[in-house]
Image (spheres, rainbow, N blue to C red):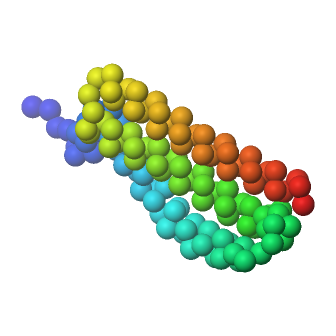
């Protein structure tokens, strides 16, 4: 008779065979978003009502730019992984592959556009 611990038994289960790792990544990114969301809302709240030049100068400062970049990157990585889990649950075969490819392209596209916009604002001001 073989003894397998509950952890060893849980590792490698699920369609992707990385269920435990995926769960921890989603948990960590969710906690990071719980911390970043209020900071991001305060940063955006400070920019509301400013003129275009003032917004460029505001996001040219390190704190607003870093908080915004972290929020976008962590949020979109959380989105990508969450969409992959949802797609794995509800779609099959080619539909699943196409949907995952589009969700990953969309997520990384949003990250690239946001980081580019923040960099452009930082170097414009």
Q: Residue at x 33, y 27 (%)?
A: 95
- In the picture, measured across the screen, residue 3 lies left or right of residue 107, that is left
Examine the image and state in which quarter residue 121 appears: bottom right
Most extreme residue toward the left is 1
Q: Is residue 58 visible?
A: no
| Residue closer to the observer: 34 or 112 | 112
Q: Residue at x 42, y 51 (%)?
A: 26
Q: Quadrant of the C terminus?
A: bottom right
Q: Is residue 5 left or right of residue 102?
A: left
Counting from the top left corner in percent of width and height, residue 62 is at: 80, 64
Quadrant location of the N terminus?
A: top left
Q: Residue at x 39, y 39 (%)?
A: 84
Tell me if residue 35 comes above or below residue 87 in the rendering: below
Quarter of the image holding residue 94? top left
- Side of 9 relative to 102 (left or right): left
- Residue 105, x across and y down, in percent: 54, 35
Q: Is residue 57 left or right of residue 92?
A: right
Provide residue 76's location: percent of width, then percent of height: 53, 49
> Is residue 116 shown to the viewer in this render?
yes
Residue 47 or 62: which is nearer the viewer? 47
Query: In the picture shown, does residue 125 fall above or below 22?
Result: below
Q: Is residue 122 above or below residue 99?
A: below
User: Height in image: 40 above or below 109?
Assistant: below
Position of residue 115 measured from the top left corner of the image (x, y, whole percent): 71, 49
């Amino acid at each position: 008779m073989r003894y397998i611990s509950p952890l060893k038994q849980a590792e490698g289960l699920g369609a992707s065979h990385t269920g435990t790792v995926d769960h921890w990544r989603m948990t960590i990114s969710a906690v990071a978003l719980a911390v970043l969301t209020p900071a991001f809302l305060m940063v955006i709240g400070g920019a509301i009502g400013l003129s275009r030049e003032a917004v460029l100068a505001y996001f040219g400062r390190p704190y607003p730019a870093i908080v915004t970049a972290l929020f976008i990157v962590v949020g979109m990585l959380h989105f990508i992984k969450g969409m992959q889990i949802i797609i794995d649950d509800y779609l099959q075969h080619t539909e699943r592959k196409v949907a995952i490819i589009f969700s990953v392209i969309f997520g990384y596209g949003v990250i690239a556009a946001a980081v580019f916009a923040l960099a452009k604002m930082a170097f414009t001001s």
